[in-house]
């Protein structure tokens, strides 16, 4: 079941919230206000129903039998790949490899492409604002392959220094990794421009779209990227499911990431030949229910329209920045305007640890994240260790912003 047609024109968050069972509960006897969407989103009933329907009515393994249940499961699982391909405008659904999350997708590139194509002295260029998922795999390659790892810096406001990018790119740059949108600052990076620069030196490009995919229309053909990683749980889907987009020509040449069942064509005691795409990279029994649930999440988002989602969030962001900037001793990190920015706001109350701030907000029924947000290099660059973070989505409204502001003012009084 996709989103109701009456939602598609207005994107009314109060109406949308009715599709999400979790919002019937309370926290500390307060209505739940969920502002931790950059960490994970909530699930609409249609996604829950899709997963339940699989387990109740056609639970079976895929690609392994001719009986009815296996056929139905295989068709639904493959259909989810097709929905993911359409979601990002891939040329073919065979360019979509289901993974556990964006982290595994990036690791797939590191192991299946990096280990076999990088040589000592080669360079990888990423940005200082990357999530750890787009840093640690390349550090692993640095140790194993004796390559160089370089970082593009950011301005104090949190935007990439594109001049530095051009200077750091060399003939030895073999891979460029960039986060589409920062999970800390909300900054939307000029990904197409970065990819164009990388292509001039012949570098492979990897885009971490975990934060961008739930909020922005993405067209991988227009971007021209080689790989793009997405997490399902950040876009209304189940946990433990995501996908890697890879250009077919590259995926065909790459070695499998994992080895075992279903990723093979033939096996003898002496040799093995691999399965066709994308199954070549999906060894063993996959997260079938998760893939089907992800397909249902894509249906829901497509019915709303990514353009409408982004427009709605821009209104919330503008309102939130206006209100939060009026709070004394509240420091906001990242751009202070809505241009090329998602509705993700990291902040600190001066003199109050962000965990304490998050605790006070929780007492008011407001869920935010506090910590380093898996982006410690960026934190250090901007001169802090931790922040609180409020991140908004389709079911959030200006009322949620007002509740956040009131709770922050309460926290100020308590710690004054």
Image (cartoon, rainbow, N blue to C red):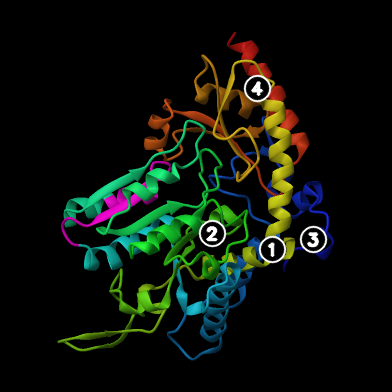
- Asked if the magenta segment contains residue 135, the reply would be yes
Earlier residue among tags 1 and 3: 3
Horizontal placement of 306 versus 188: left or right? right
Q: Position of residue 373 (x, y in %)?
A: 46, 38
Q: CA distance from mark 1 to mark 2?
A: 13 Å
Q: CA distance from mark 3 to mark 4?
A: 33 Å
Residue positioned most to the bottom: 66
Give the quadrant of residue 292: bottom right
Q: Nearer the viewer, residue 24 or 135?
A: 135
Earlier residue among tags 1 and 2: 2
Residue tagged 4: 408
Q: Which mark is residue 232?
A: 2
Q: Position of residue 232 (x, y in %)?
A: 54, 59
Circle 2 SS class: helix
Identify the residue at horizontal 57%, vertical 71% (top origin).
Answer: 89
Q: Which mark is residue 300?
A: 1
Identify the residue at horizontal 51%, vertical 83% (top origin).
Answer: 70
Give the residues in magenta. 119-138
Q: Which one is in front in this view, the residue at disc 3 or the one at disc 4?
A: 3
Residue tagged 3: 8
Horizontal placement of 86 versus 377: left or right? right
């Amino acid at each position: 079941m996709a989103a109701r047609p009456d939602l598609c024109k207005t994107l009314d968050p109060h109406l949308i919230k009715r599709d999400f069972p979790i919002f019937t509960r309370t926290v500390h006897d307060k209505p739940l206000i969920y502002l931790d969407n950059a960490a994970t989103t909530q699930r609409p009933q249609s996604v829950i129903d899709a997963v339940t329907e699989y387990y109740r009515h056609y639970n079976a393994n895929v690609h392994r039998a001719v009986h009815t249940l296996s056929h139905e499961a295989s068709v639904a699982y493959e259909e989810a790949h097709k929905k993911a391909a359409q979601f990002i405008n891939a040329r073919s659904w065979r360019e979509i490899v289901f993974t556990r999350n964006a982290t595994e997708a990036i690791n797939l590139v590191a192991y299946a492409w990096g280990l076999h194509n990088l040589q000592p002295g080669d360079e990888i260029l990423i940005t200082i604002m990357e999530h750890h998922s787009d840093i640690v795999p390349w550090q692993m390659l640095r140790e194993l392959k004796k390559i160089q790892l370089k970082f593009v810096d950011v301005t104090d406001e949190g935007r990439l220094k594109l001049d530095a990018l051009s200077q750091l790119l060399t003939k030895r740059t073999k891979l460029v990794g960039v986060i589409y949108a920062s999970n800390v600052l909300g900054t939307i990076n000029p990904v197409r421009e970065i990819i164009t620069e990388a292509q001039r030196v012949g570098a492979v490009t990897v885009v971490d779209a975990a934060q961008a995919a739930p909020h922005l229309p993405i067209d991988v053909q227009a971007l021209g990227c080689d790989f793009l990683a997405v997490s399902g749980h950040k876009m209304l889907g189940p946990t433990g499911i995501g996908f890697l987009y890879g250009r077919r020509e590259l995926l065909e040449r790459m070695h499998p990431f994992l080895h075992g069942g279903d990723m093979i064509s033939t096996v003898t005691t002496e040799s093995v030949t691999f399965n066709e795409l994308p199954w070549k990279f999906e060894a063993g029994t996959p997260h079938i229910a998760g893939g089907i649930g992800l397909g249902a999440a894509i249906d829901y988002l497509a019915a709303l329209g990514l353009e409408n989602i982004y427009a709605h969030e821009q209104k919330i962001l503008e309102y939130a920045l206006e209100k939060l900037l009026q709070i004394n001793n509240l420091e906001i990190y990242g751009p202070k305007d809505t241009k090329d920015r998602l509705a993700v706001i990291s902040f600190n109350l001066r003199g109050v640890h962000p965990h304490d701030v998050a605790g006070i907000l929780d007492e008011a029924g407001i869920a935010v994240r506090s910590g380093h947000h898996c982006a410690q290099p960026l934190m250090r660059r901007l001169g802090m260790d931790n922040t609180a973070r409020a991140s908004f989505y389709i079911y959030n409204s200006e009322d949620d912003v007002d509740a956040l502001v009131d709770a922050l003012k309460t926290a100020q009084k308590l710690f004054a």
